[in-house]
């Protein structure tokens, strides 16, 4: 019975990831032991911190929202068996465009906010489509091109921030705080019977309506991936690109779209950084989060429904690390060490067998008979 | 052109000198149970040119890989110059003086010819390469063996013939006394083939031994001293080439096919469905793969293509299904051009395709059976409703296909990887047959699947044809082509060598002569029958 | 701004000297990137390797009081971290890009973490007395007007960068090991059949890459600055990768591309002081790299097409005269 359960790929994947996280946390504790005067206290702060106060929980949830969007963005590309490191650039431009609209377009909130979000998505789409096009039509290495585009986006962001957005004469590189019409509203509506909760959250833990948007994007991504023709094309391309072209799928178009759709979601994540978290545009707005989508997508095995859970778990570690730093003598960067170990353990094929090996085995079994120079199976029975 | 009237080498030495290579009772069973060699005895005498012939899957390559240390025999012994050897890698074989030239060349494209030849054994001084010496040594062995190469040319820019000479020189540079050439002429033009042969003769004159694998009996007669024929994992016989005729070799190669009885109502030939006109294809390396191929396929008939693999069939099918661009020519389905269109456009013209390599093209292993069944139709009614795919319909369609085509699985949502080879093929057949094709292109439809599945697929093909579908059947299994087809085209080196309107009365030996390029129908005669 | 002022500042000796200084921590990791690229792997981890070396060099030099020991320790740490990358990639079969990302994260987090443990500061190591490598003043040459001011007085890593470029060129194109490395990158099967150990060759390439990148890191913390600063490599490892491609995957080309990046960076500083948006100037090398990628691939496609057409025409001509078989 247990053996049978273990054979289920889903269960196996889950165990694998659980094991990776456990090992990494264990190593994290060993490190804490070595450096801290109060290792237990520090680790306790790390592991329970996000739940101890409402504002801390708020930090965690906000982090989770960004991570969810980024994880979805990466999963959309990974699912097609492609690689993109371009989320940072797409986020930066998404933040820049949405932030500019929040700051400068004189519209009421009901129009300004949707306009800003849509603009972030459009710019993400375009900035994502570019490396996709280069990959599909010119076979240009997508890792190099997305890294280059990140560097370009970073400088464009800085340029607009410093020369056009930051207030005249300010000594720091940041915009003014967004006006109220440009900030995402709190996720609890300001209605009389919820007044107390509204008050609590808007003051102490300003989780915005991006929470709902993120949930909607999760469902939408799942729907697109598993229920639409486009998602079908994406998944078939990822499973076997030769099969996709043989079956009549336009693989080039699918590749471009995979990058572009991924860009939409990253653009939205960028808008969340400005309009939901910082409430202004700051230099290095994506610092520390640029490649985090990859970790989340890896933990979620590119399954959109699993992404928010992976983001919750991972966001919890990040938020916990912040709290550990504030309340103990261990710095938050320990979580980066844990994160690196998780990536290595989850991706190392030899740590635990994964589904790919099953497929490989099936391939090997059939291969001999398929290879033109090898004999037919019927001879062997 | 006979082999220069020279007596078979090694003839006199046989008494006192052991064969330079001797294999005794070789069995090779692959981990999946496939038995590639079944008790093969094979020996090569020093200083001879030994041809090894046989159809695809006869076990020639496996045998050569055993000699070259790339595979270990399951049973049996390998002797080199009378000493038993156990090779662990090709490195060991190279050290024992054996060199092999693979069909797909193992060259580094950006390196010069000389750099490729000395790779791994570069001449150096104080740790630095001596490029001049590499070039000189290349020139020297090039001249010694009459294998003309330009040592300083970049491999990427040289033609196939020279690439092959580089491969041979690579082996000679490493001190090979015994050279194995795996289908060396498959990629060469007739002129280059002649050059290769004179080079081979020169090598033998200088004391080398050459084993060469081929399908082409003309070449066997032309260049070899002795010939061994393999069929279905066994060595059928070895004889001096002068005692063999092309006809007798063809008979040994093809053997008696067990023709299965296929219940086949007489063909009712309908209108012309596909018309192929003067189709030619030259590949990236400059090889002319298809040469002015023209034929028609009619509704209600199975047109079989008989030929040894590698004579352009794979490319023909890929071109006709939109997976490969043609160089010139025309192809029409019901009057609509299908050449150089996308696979989707070809499919929309009511063409369906069973690909020859189901794992590479035909299936996505990680995807579910149901999803594999809809790759050609997910985007249209009834599978698409509005913006989404209606998975209820997909599942129903999957369940129906699984039942109708007898795919053995508990659930259509399982990945295709969970199926056996035969059931995988049924998934493809189910998909391609249910798309209501007017033309069905079936490449190697029963390769590597069990007897039951084979029978099923064949019955389905005949039924489709009886219902009025035009079928193009490409198969390396001659028995299959002969028993299923209504009309047969023989192909050899990318050209049609014969058309046989009445497949049933045709003998396999006769057909073999056309497949092996020994006979060719006059153009006028063919034209009428195409 | 006045165009004249810009031109004059660009061609000043001080400016060109600063280009060399700024380019050095790009040239060295770029050479490392080149070696791994030619062996058939993308080394995303250059950034992390540099950080680790920069950090180790400063710490060891501060605690031992010896700049030499610091440099040696920095180099060893860079090689070790490359070994970890190689072990996961080649032995554990981890995707090299994901493993590279993990190494970068580990390096970023690990260096800040240890910095805090050792100094109580998370920003930089200025509280530690670490050394810097010496500058080299060339007698006679320093008296030559202009040139003397450009090349004399540079720190030793500038010279090491040029020296290593030459050595890498020799290694890749003049030694059998370099030849094996390139063969493995282009056609591992061919290399394997010729008795070359593919995995070992790739591991060696990664280790050399770590060796080279570690000098880049040490340049940052023991020459360019005199202390370690958190995330001080600031994306140079990625720029280095771009230099490999822009440089046409050749040692001297990579050097030139890295200097071009350094030039753009120095120029943007110069322009920044003139109130010209330096950020826009800094994008130029990246845009050029993308264009180079595009042009390279377009050319490849054209070459393939031409070759096929040429073969076809050639054969048509032959058929016309010779009449086929």
Image (cartoon, grey):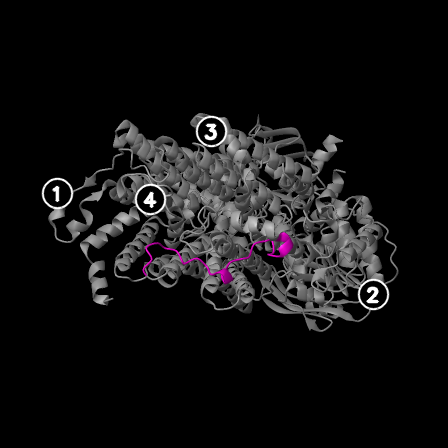
In depth, the one of C51 and B374 nearer the eye is: C51
Q: Residue at x 53, y 67 (%)?
A: A108
Separation of marks 3 and 2 at Cα, in angstroms? 75 Å
Image vertical order of residue A159 relative to residue A318, above or below: below
How far apart marks 1 and 2 lie (CA) works out to 94 Å
- Please state if A314 lies on the left or on the right of B491 as rendered: left
Q: Position of residue B475 (x, y in %)?
A: 72, 53
The residue singled out by tag 3 in the image is: A31
From the viewer's side, name the closer residue of B250 and C244: C244
Q: Is residue B5 above or below residue A275?
A: above
Kindly identify which residue carries mark 1.
C139
Q: Position of residue B168 (x, y in %)?
A: 49, 45
Q: Residues within 10 Å of mark 2 (few under 14, many from 20)?
A: many
At a point 80% along the width and 67% down the height, the residue shown is: B299
Q: Which residue is mark 2?
A: B468
Span highlighted in magenta in the image: A169-194
Chain to which mark 3 belongs:
A
Closest to the observer, B286 or C249: C249
Element assignment for label 1: loop
């Amino acid at each position: 019975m247990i053996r049978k359960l273990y054979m289920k790929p889903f269960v196996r994947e889950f165990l694998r990831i659980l094991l990776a996280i456990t090992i990494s946390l264990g190593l994290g504790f060993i490190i804490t032991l070595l450096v801290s005067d109060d290792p237990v206290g520090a680790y306790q702060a790390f592991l329970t911190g996000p739940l101890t106060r409402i504002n801390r929980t708020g930090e965690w949830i906000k982090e989770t929202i960004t991570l969810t969007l980024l994880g979805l963005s990466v999963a959309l590309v990974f699912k097609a068996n492609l690689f993109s490191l371009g989320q940072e650039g797409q986020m930066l431009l998404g933040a820049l465009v949405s932030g500019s609209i929040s700051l400068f377009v004189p519209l009421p909130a009901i129009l300004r906010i949707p306009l800003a979000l849509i603009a972030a998505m459009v710019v993400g789409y375009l900035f994502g489509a570019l490396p996709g096009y280069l990959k599909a039509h010119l076979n240009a290495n997508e890792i190099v091109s997305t890294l280059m585009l990140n560097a370009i986006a970073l400088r464009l962001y800085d340029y607009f921030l410093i020369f056009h957005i930051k207030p005249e004469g300010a000594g720091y590189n940041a915009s003014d705080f967004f006006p109220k019409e440009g900030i995402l509203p709190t996720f609890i509506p300001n209605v009389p019977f919820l007044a107390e909760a509204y008050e609590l959250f808007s003051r102490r833990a300003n989780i915005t309506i991006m929470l709902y948007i993120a949930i909607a994007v999760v469902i939408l991504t799942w729907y697109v991936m598993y229920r639409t023709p486009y998602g079908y094309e994406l998944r078939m391309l990822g499973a076997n690109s030769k099969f996709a072209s043989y079956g009549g799928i336009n693989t080039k178009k699918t590749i471009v779209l995979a990058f572009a759709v991924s860009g939409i979601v990253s653009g939205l994540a960028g808008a969340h950084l400005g309009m939901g978290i910082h409430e202004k545009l700051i230099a290095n707005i994506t610092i520390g989060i640029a490649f985090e989508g990859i970790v989340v997508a890896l933990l979620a095995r590119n399954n959109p429904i699993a992404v928010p859970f992976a983001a919750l778990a991972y966001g919890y570690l990040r938020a916990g690390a912040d709290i550990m730093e504030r309340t103990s003598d261990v710095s938050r960067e320990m979580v980066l060490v844990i994160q690196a170990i998780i990536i290595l353990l989850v991706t190392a094929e030899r740590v635990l067998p994964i589904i790919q090996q099953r497929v490989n085995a099936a391939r090997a079994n059939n291969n001999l008979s398929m290879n033109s120079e090898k004999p037919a199976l019927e001879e062997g029975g | 052109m006979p082999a220069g009237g020279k007596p078979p080498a090694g003839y006199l030495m046989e008494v006192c000198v052991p064969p330079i290579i001797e294999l005794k009772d070789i069995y090779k069973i692959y981990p999946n149970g496939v038995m590639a060699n079944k008790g093969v005895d094979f020996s090569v005498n020093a200083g001879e040119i030994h041809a090894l012939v046989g159809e695809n899957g006869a076990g020639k390559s496996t045998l050569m890989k055993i000699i070259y240390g790339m595979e270990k025999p399951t049973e049996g012994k390998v002797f080199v110059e009378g000493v038993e050897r156990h090779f662990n890698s090709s490195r060991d074989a190279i050290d024992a003086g054996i060199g092999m030239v693979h069909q797909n060349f193992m060259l580094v494209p950006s390196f010069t010819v000389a750099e490729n030849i000395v790779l791994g054994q570069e001449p150096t001084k104080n740790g630095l390469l001596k490029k001049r010496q590499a070039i000189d040594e290349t020139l020297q062995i090039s001249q010694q063996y009459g294998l003309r190469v330009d040592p300083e040319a970049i491999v990427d820019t040289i033609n196939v013939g020279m690439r092959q000479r580089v491969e041979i020189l690579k082996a000679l540079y490493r001190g090979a006394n015994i050279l194995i050439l795996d289908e060396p002429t498959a990629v060469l033009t007739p002129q280059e083939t002649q050059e290769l042969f004179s080079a081979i003769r020169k090598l033998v004159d200088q004391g080398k031994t050459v084993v060469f694998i081929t399908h082409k009996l003309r070449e066997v007669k032309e260049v070899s001293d002795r010939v061994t024929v393999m069929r279905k994992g066994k060595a059928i016989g070895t004889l001096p080439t002068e005692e063999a005729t092309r006809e007798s070799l063809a008979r040994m190669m093809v053997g008696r096919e067990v023709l299965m009885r296929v219940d086949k109502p007489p063909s009712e030939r309908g209108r012309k469905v596909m018309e192929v006109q003067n189709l030619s294809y030259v590949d990236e390396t400059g090889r002319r793969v298809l040469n002015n191929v023209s034929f028609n396929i009619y509704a209600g008939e199975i047109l079989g293509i008989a030929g040894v693999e590698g004579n352009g069939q794979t490319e023909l099918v890929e071109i006709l299904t939109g997976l490969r661009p043609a160089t010139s020519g025309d192809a029409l389905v019901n009057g609509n051009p299908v050449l150089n269109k996308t696979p989707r456009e070809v499919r929309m013209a009511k063409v369906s395709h069973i690909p020859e390599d189901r794992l590479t093209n035909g299936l996505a292993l990680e995807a579910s059976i149901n999803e594999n069944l809809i790759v050609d139709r997910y985007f249209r009614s009834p599978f698409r409703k509005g913006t989404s795919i209606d998975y209820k319909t997909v599942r129903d369609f999957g369940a129906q296909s699984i039942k109708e085509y007898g795919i053995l699985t508990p659930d259509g949502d399982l990945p295709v990887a969970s199926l056996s080879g035969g059931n995988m093929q049924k998934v493809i057949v189910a998909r391609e047959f249910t798309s209501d094709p007017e033309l069905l292109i079936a490449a190697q439809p029963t390769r590597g699947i069990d007897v039951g599945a084979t029978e099923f697929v064949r019955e389905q093909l005949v039924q489709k044809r009886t219902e009025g579908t035009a079928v193009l059947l490409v198969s390396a299994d001659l028995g299959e082509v002969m028993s299923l087809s209504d009309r047969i085209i023989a192909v050899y080196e990318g050209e049609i060598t014969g058309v046989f309107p009445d497949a049933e009365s045709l003998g396999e030996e006769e057909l073999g002569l056309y497949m092996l390029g020994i006979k060719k129908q006059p153009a006028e005669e063919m034209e009428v029958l195409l | 701004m006045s165009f004249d002022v810009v031109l004059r500042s660009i061609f000043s000796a001080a400016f060109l000297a600063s280009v060399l200084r700024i380019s050095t921590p790009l040239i060295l990791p770029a050479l490392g990137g080149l070696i791994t690229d030619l062996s058939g792997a993308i080394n995303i981890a250059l950034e992390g390797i540099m950080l680790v070396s920069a950090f180790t060099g400063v710490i060891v030099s501060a605690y031992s009081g010896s700049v030499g020991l610091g440099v040696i320790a920095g180099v060893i740490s860079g090689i070790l971290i490359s070994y970890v990358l190689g072990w996961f990639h080649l032995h554990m079969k981890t995707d090299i890009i994901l493993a590279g990302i993990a190494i970068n994260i580990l390096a970023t987090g690990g260096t800040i973490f240890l910095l805090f443990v050792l100094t109580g500061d998370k920003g930089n190591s200025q509280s530690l007395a670490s050394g810097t490598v010496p500058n080299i003043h060339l007698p006679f040459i320093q008296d030559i007007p202009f040139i003397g001011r450009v090349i004399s007085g540079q720190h030793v890593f500038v010279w090491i960068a040029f020296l290593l470029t030459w050595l890498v060129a020799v290694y890749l194109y003049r030694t059998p090991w370099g030849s094996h490395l390139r063969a493995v990158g282009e056609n591992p099967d061919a290399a394997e059949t010729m008795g070359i150990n593919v995995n070992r060759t790739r591991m060696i390439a990664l280790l050399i890459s770590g060796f080279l990148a570690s000098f880049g890191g040490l340049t940052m913390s023991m020459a360019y600055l005199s202390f370690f600063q958190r995330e001080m490599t600031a994306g140079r490892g990625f720029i280095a990768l771009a230099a490999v491609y822009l440089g046409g995957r050749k040692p001297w080309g990579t050097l030139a591309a890295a200097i071009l990046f350094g030039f753009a960076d120095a120029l943007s500083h110069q322009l920044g002081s003139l109130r010209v948006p330096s950020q826009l100037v800094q994008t130029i090398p990246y845009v050029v790299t993308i264009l180079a990628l595009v042009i390279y691939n377009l050319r490849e496609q054209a070459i393939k097409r031409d070759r096929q057409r040429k073969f076809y025409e050639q054969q048509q001509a032959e058929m016309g005269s010779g009449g086929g078989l």
